[in-house]
Every structure is written in C-alpha cells, then in structure tokens.
Image (cartoon, helix red, strand yellow):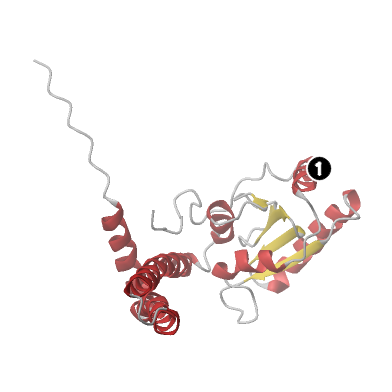
Amino acid sequence: MARPTPAPAKEPGRLKQMWQVFQMTRRYDGTIVLYLLLAFLAPIGAGIVLAVIFGAGNPVLWILYIVAGVLAGVLLSLIVLGRRAEKAAFSQIEGQAGAVGAVLKSSLRRSWTGNEIPINFNKTQDAVYRAVGKGGVVLIGEGPRTRTQPMLDKERANVRRILPEVPVHLIYVDAHDPEATSLHRIVPTLAKYKRALNKSEIQAVSNRLQSLGKNGLPIPKGIDPQRVRAPRPR
C-alpha cells in the first residue's frame, strides 16, 4: 500500500513573517524598537494636532484624522522595518567575496540593472561589478582600493572605448575602509546620480556592454548571492 504523500508545510502568514524579520533585525540592530515607535507614533501625533486645529467641534473629522494617522503610522513602520532589516542583512555579509553581487541581485530598483557575477576579479577575490541605469554606467570595486583601482581603470577604459558619450561612475566597497561605500548605501548612491539615460537607452547600453565578453567569468569563491537576500515584510 502506497504511503500517503505528506502535506507540504504551510508558509508562515504575513504577521508571522514580519515578526520573524523583526526578531532577526533586533539581533543586529539594537535601535530598531526606537525607530519603529517613532515611525508609528509620529503620524498619530500629527493626526491629533490636525484634528485639534481643523476638527474642533466636529467628531467625524477627529476620527478621520486619527484613523489616517494610525494607518500612516503602520505604513511608515513597515517601511522603516524593511529598510533596517535590509541594512542588518547586508551587515552580516559585508566584507565577504560576492557581497556586492548579492546587493545587485536583490536590491536594485527598476531604473537600474546589474549582474551578481563580477566582470573582473583577481586571485585575492577582489572584484569589479557593473550596473547600468539612469545615471549611466557604474563600476563597483569590491576590495581594497589599491587593488581594485587598476581593474576599475581598465573597465572604465573599456566602457569609454565603446560608449564615449555615456557617463561612467566608480564606487569603492571595502568593509575595512571608513571612506568606502558600505553595502547598504550602494542603492541610495546609485539613486543620487543625475539622469543621463532613458529607459530605451539603458537597455541599449546594457546590450552594448555585453559585447565586452566579461559576463561569462565565474563568480569568485565566497557567499552565494542567490542565497543571500535582504528579508522584507510581505
């Protein structure tokens, strides 16, 4: 007699997922509770102030302002939790080979594209990654600047050779360099670049860069970007 197939394990509900994300974040970020309280209470306080100013003698407006404040507080708290959770997750892998690839794989916004596989690396596992987006082409060096600078200069020359009109930016990521960009600041740094390409130009530039023939390089040994993703509340 065939054994009954065990029922698949149920995925945790959204509230349980958010609780798990909160617990993980709290282990690495002791200020998360304070940030969440501020994010939740500030909109409620603003709603009460607005109710006092504009809703005097009108209980309906009082209720609407306070309910709106509570909803805004919940939304802002979820946003703060997601940001702090992402930062906590990246802090766990900072300094490991392949960490930049994990960020490019899991956190890039729609206006940017990137690959978790480095376009250049050396025997000491220093690497160069490439992202293409509204700001142009960004080359990201992972490792000490003294070792990644030659690789970055080489890749920048390659890009300018085939795309001389496209801006090329450099980012240095090194956990041991206080002046370098930290993992959780990569995406905000990309967002600060002035728009230079539209959507169709981004795709065209990305396709053109494939001709450099670098994307077939194997990823250096280290963390697996496919398995390292910043947890987010669903």
x and y percent of residue 59 in the render?
A: 32, 74
Question: Of the residues shown, which amino acid type is indicated by label 1?
Answer: Arg
> In which quadrant of the rendered view does residue 107 lie?
bottom right
Mark 1 surroundings within 10 Å by alpha-carbon count, few (fewer than 14), some (14 through 19), many (20 or more): few
* Occupied quadrant, residue 186: bottom right
Which corner quadrant holds the N terminus?
top left
Callout 1: SS = helix
What residue occupies the far front of the structure in this picture?
57
Q: Which residue lies furthest to the left in this view?
A: 1
Q: Does residue 142 appear to the left or right of 72 in the view shown? A: right
Residue 140: x and y, percent?
A: 68, 62
Front residue of 210 and 198: 198
Q: Is residue 129 above or below residue 50?
A: above
At a point 45% along the width and 66% down the height, the residue shown is 79
Q: In which quarter of the image is residue 176?
A: bottom right
Kindly identify the residue that appears in the image at 44 percent across and 84 percent down.
53
**In this figure, what is the number of numbered marks?**
1
Q: Identify which residue is drawn at 36% across, 79% down.
A: 41
Q: Mark 1 points at which residue?
A: 208
Instruction: Identify the residue shown where x is 39% and y is 72%.
Output: 65
Query: Residue 77: percent from the left, percent from the top?
Result: 39, 69
Does 154 sit left or right of 188 as displayed? right
- Percent across and percent down for residue 106 are 53, 53
Q: Is residue 77 above or below residue 119?
A: below
Observer-nearest of 226 and 32: 32
